[in-house]
């Protein structure tokens, strides 16, 4: 408690200077659309992970997939190696807005922790597997096929980190009395949990709606994710605008 | 009970000393890993890679077990940076949360890379192609994903620039230095793509520049943090003295 109360006067008096009072929040907000545009460019256009190539294919077809897209996979995932950290900045912004909610900051810390975990199996493992698959043209084709499965199953099938992440966000919004985010955002976030559950069968099916490229496991989940993300970005902007200049945020 | 100030200051000092001790231990492991001096060539054949693991099995295991045990010991050091960022008179604490999230993900990558080296060394009689793949994954995971460190350093630099205190927590040059280190590390993302030249994982830029820039960052931040902790202690002693004077005046 001493730390929080002692730190506050310095923070408030610092506003005397002429800089934009919410500059750090706006920088982090702009990172959101920038990162997810780049994410789309990398995963959809360059590396062809989204929409995913078919699971039920033979070793030869897998190798020709990597042969056909080797250059763009290298370019796309090298970009991801540099810019993946922007995801952490977006975490920070959501976490900060959660701190403004009337609930104790437990969900905030859980939000940061779950996404810090999720970035590694949920995005970077796919990149490592695909990069390794195209690193040596003379690699044993069966090992290349193994990397294909590692990349796509970790990408589509990293469920729990995000399920927990959505759960704590939805709970924080639902319990918040300060109305930082509207209640309907909690419902959309709960839907995100449902999409993660519906992606669980990717570990079983090689074709059909529940395969990693299926109508339910991939397309339905992705559509809801895009809606969720769009709402989150718009609501974050609104939350920053509506945040009072002299508001004291819990430490 | 909230921690008293002296306890918190002690936690910071202890974290710095932990970083010094384990930094030295990690440097020892770095120097003794047979694959770093000189760094293994990504162009080596599967047979050459397998022979390397067979000849150097003991030292590979010893050095990588040390990486495994001690790499994450630098986390308290990064958390001292988070704490000091939270003391800054920035408009909000959002950059500290972004830094925390990036640090957690970044350390996870360090924790994964040594596992691939240790798995590769576990059965030297494995198919050389498989050993080569594990070796590729170790090197790619160790060198290429610089994005988390880049995000950490950019968050730190922005916070330093936005710190409105009359006497900033960190001097401004720490911001410039932090950005310079991030820029020096960015090209190492190419280690996941190139097998020869300065951007390959054994190259002048991806190996030597990247690793020495990061080493320099840790050393410089050790002294910067030590100074910040001393100044914090001074400020708190002053505040306590002032409070006592005030109490006496009231009496």
Image: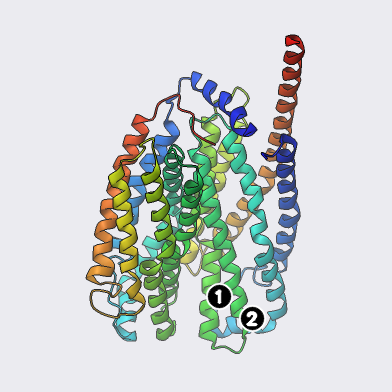
What's the chain of the residue with tag 2?
A: B
Provide the residue designation for mark 2. Answer: B53
In this rendering, the answer to whether A209 lies above or below A45 is below
What's the chain of the residue with tag 1?
A: B
Q: Residue B226, can we see it?
A: yes
In the image shown, does A37 or A1 lie closer to the viewer? Answer: A1
- Determine whether the residue tagged by mark 1 lies in a helix, strand or loop: helix
Provide the residue designation for mark 1. Answer: B135
In the image shown, does B184 or A30 lie closer to the viewer? Answer: A30
Which residue is located at x 73 percent, y 31 percent? Answer: B233
Residue A121 is tagged as: none
Where in the figure is residue B242, as x and y percent of width and height? Answer: 73, 18
For marks 1 and 2, give the CA distance: 9 Å
- Determine whether the residue tagged by mark 2 lies in a helix, strand or loop: helix
Dot 1 and dot 2 residues touching (CB under 8 Å): yes
Where in the figure is residue A182, as x and y percent of width and height? Answer: 30, 41
């Amino acid at each position: 408690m001493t730390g929080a109360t002692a730190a506050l006067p310095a923070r408030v008096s610092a506003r005397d200077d002429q800089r934009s009072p919410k500059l750090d929040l706006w920088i982090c907000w702009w990172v959101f659309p920038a990162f997810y545009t780049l994410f789309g460019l990398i995963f959809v256009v360059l590396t062809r992970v989204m929409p995913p190539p078919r699971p039920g294919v033979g070793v030869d077809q897998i190798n020709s997939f990597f042969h056909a897209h080797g250059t763009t996979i290298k370019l796309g995932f090298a970009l991801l190696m540099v810019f993946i950290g922007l995801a952490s900045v977006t975490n920070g912004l959501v976490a900060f807005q959660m701190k403004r909610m009337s609930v104790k900051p437990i969900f905030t810390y859980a939000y940061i922790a779950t996404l810090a975990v999720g970035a590694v199996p949920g995005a970077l493992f796919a990149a490592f597997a695909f990069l390794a698959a195209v690193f040596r043209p003379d690699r044993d084709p069966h090992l290349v096929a193994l990397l294909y499965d590692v990349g796509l199953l970790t990408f589509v099938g990293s469920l729990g980190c995000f399920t927990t992440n959505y759960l704590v966000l939805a709970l924080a919004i639902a319990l918040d009395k300060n109305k930082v985010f509207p209640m309907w955002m909690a419902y959309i976030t709960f839907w995100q949990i449902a999409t993660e559950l519906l992606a669980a069968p990717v570990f079983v099916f090689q074709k059909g709606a529940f395969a990693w490229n299926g109508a339910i496991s991939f397309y339905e989940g992705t559509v809801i994710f895009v809606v969720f993300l769009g709402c989150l970005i718009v609501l974050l902007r609104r939350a920053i605008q509506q945040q009072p200049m002299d508001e004291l945020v819990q430490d | 009970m909230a921690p008293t100030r002296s306890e918190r200051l002690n936690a910071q000092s202890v974290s710095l000393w932990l970083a010094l001790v384990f930094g030295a231990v990690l440097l020892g492991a770095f120097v003794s890993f047979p694959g770093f001096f000189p760094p293994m060539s990504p162009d080596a054949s599967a047979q050459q890679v397998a022979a390397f693991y067979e000849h150097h099995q003991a030292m590979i295991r010893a050095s990588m077990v040390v990486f495994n045990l001690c790499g994450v010991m630098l986390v308290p050091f990064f958390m001292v940076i988070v704490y000091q960022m939270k003391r800054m008179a920035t408009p909000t604490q959002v950059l500290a949360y972004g830094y925390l999230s990036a640090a957690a993900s970044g350390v996870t990558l360090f924790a994964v890379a040594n596992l691939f080296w240790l798995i590769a060394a576990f059965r030297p009689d494995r198919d050389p192609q498989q050993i080569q793949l594990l070796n590729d994954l170790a090197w790619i995971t160790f060198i290429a994903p610089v994005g988390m460190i880049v995000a950490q350093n950019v968050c730190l630099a922005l916070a330093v620039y936005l710190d409105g205190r009359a006497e900033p927590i960190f001097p401004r040059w720490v911001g410039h230095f932090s950005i310079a280190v991030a820029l020096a590390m960015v090209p190492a993302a190419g280690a996941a793509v190139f097998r020869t030249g300065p951007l390959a994982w054994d190259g002048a830029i991806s190996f030597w520049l990247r690793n020495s820039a990061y080493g320099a960052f840790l050393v410089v931040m050790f002294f910067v943090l030590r100074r910040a902790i001393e100044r914090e202690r001074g400020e708190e002693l002053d505040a306590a003295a002032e409070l006592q004077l005030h109490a006496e005046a009231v009496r």
